[in-house]
Image: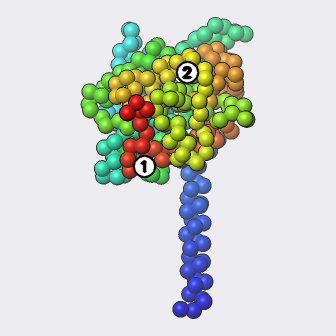
């Protein structure tokens, strides 16, 4: 073979490489998408998204439409998983992307966040609507962006449920209902991650995010291995305030006994508006949010695609 042949091969290889790099680039999550979804969910018109309100109904429709437009199927007959709480009906919204491996698709990973909030709060300067931008429109948008990402890349051997919970603020009612329903259906659930308040960054010398129930499983360690960087760490307050039990991951741990944790970037020093009317879109850091979502992708892909269930409870 002559040198022209080698030159040709070299050019072909270069060509392939740049095509791969290009295709990876085009499916990066962009700040514009993140911003526009978050700004919608935190509008005054959505009245603080309290369960059973007209405002949260708009949020539910927004989520359903986004699923539809991106070819993400409902897991149940419709996108809605309904339940009663006190005298109102709550709706979790559940999207589904089937795994691409004939065996592993029977195993599920849940990525979730709550899209409800508290409605109204103490009036400040004439504003009484608690918009819940950080809590938890931010986590909701992250789950929606990853749903779009996986619907485009199809890079998931295991099946994924994208679950947006209602009535978290009424005592984890939506996640309580859905976890029980899936347990009764004998779902083979591998792991669950709940994203809570990822709208503002931690200090620069801190690890980007932390996980609740850090020592209960090896999830943090494994996610960091998959990303090849320390993206998820330990926060002492998460342990002292028992955050593990205080959000939508907990019912899944309770029902299934599997690694089910919350990941957050709110560390009690970087945001003053928890359950406050000023928890609004203009307080969010969209560069941080977008960067967090993109950095988490290798962690999620690692978890979703390993041949074995590597993430385990520590007592096993
Ligand atoms: Zn929350």
Return the disc, 1 or 2, that comes first in the chain's sequence.
2
Quarter of the image holding residue 84? top left
Q: Is residue 56 visible?
A: no
Quarter of the image holding residue 97? top left
How far across and down, in percent of the image, does residue 165 sit? 45, 25
How far across and down, in percent of the image, does residue 45 sit? 58, 21
Q: Is mark 1 within 8 Å of ligand 1?
A: no
Q: Residue furthest bottom?
A: 2
Residue drawn at point x = 36 percent, y = 28 percent: 257
In the figure, 166 relative to 301: above or below?
above
In the figure, 297 relative to 161: above or below?
below
Residue drawn at point x = 34 percent, y = 52 percent: 101
According to the image, label 2 marks what residue?
239
**Distance Cα–Cα, label 1 vs label 2:** 30 Å
Q: Residue furthest left?
A: 185
According to the image, label 1 marks what residue?
305
In the figure, 238 relative to 187: above or below?
above
Q: Is residue 202 visible?
A: yes
Q: In the rendered view, does 144 fall on the left or right side of 86?
A: right
Q: Callout 1: helix, strand or loop?
A: helix
């Amino acid at each position: 073979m002559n040198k022209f042949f080698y030159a040709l091969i070299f050019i072909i290889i270069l060509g392939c490489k740049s095509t791969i790099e290009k295709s990876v680039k085009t499916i990066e999550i962009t700040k514009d998408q993140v911003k526009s979804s978050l700004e919608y969910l935190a509008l005054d018109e959505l009245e603080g998204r309290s369960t059973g309100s007209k405002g949260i109904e708009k949020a539910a429709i927004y989520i359903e439409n986004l699923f539809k437009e991106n070819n993400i199927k409902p897991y149940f007959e419709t996108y809605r998983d309904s339940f009663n709480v006190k005298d109102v009906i709550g709706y979790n919204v559940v999207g589904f992307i089937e795994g691409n491996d004939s065996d592993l698709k029977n195993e599920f990973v849940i990525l979730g966040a709550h899209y409800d909030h508290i409605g109204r709060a103490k009036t400040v300067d004439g504003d009484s609507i608690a918009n819940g931008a950080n809590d938890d429109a931010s986590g909701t948008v992250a789950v929606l962006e990853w749903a779009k990402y996986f619907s485009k890349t199809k890079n998931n051997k295991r099946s994924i449920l994208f679950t947006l919970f209602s009535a978290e603020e009424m005592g984890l009612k939506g996640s309580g209902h859905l976890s029980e329903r899936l347990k009764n259906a004998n779902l083979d659930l591998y792991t669950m991650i709940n994203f809570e308040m990822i709208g503002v960054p931690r200090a620069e010398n801190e690890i980007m995010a932390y996980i609740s129930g850090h020592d209960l499983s090896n999830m943090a360690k494994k996610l960091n291995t998959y990303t090849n960087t320390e993206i998820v760490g330990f926060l002492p307050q998460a342990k002292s305030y028992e955050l593990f039990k205080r959000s939508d991951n907990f019912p899944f741990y309770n029902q299934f006994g599997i690694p089910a944790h919350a990941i957050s970037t709110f560390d009690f020093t970087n945001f003053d508006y928890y359950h406050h009317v000023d928890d609004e879109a203009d307080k969010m850091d969209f560069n941080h949010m977008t960067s967090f979502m993109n950095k988490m992708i290798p962690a999620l892909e690692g978890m979703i695609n390993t041949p074995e269930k590597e993430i385990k409870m520590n007592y096993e």
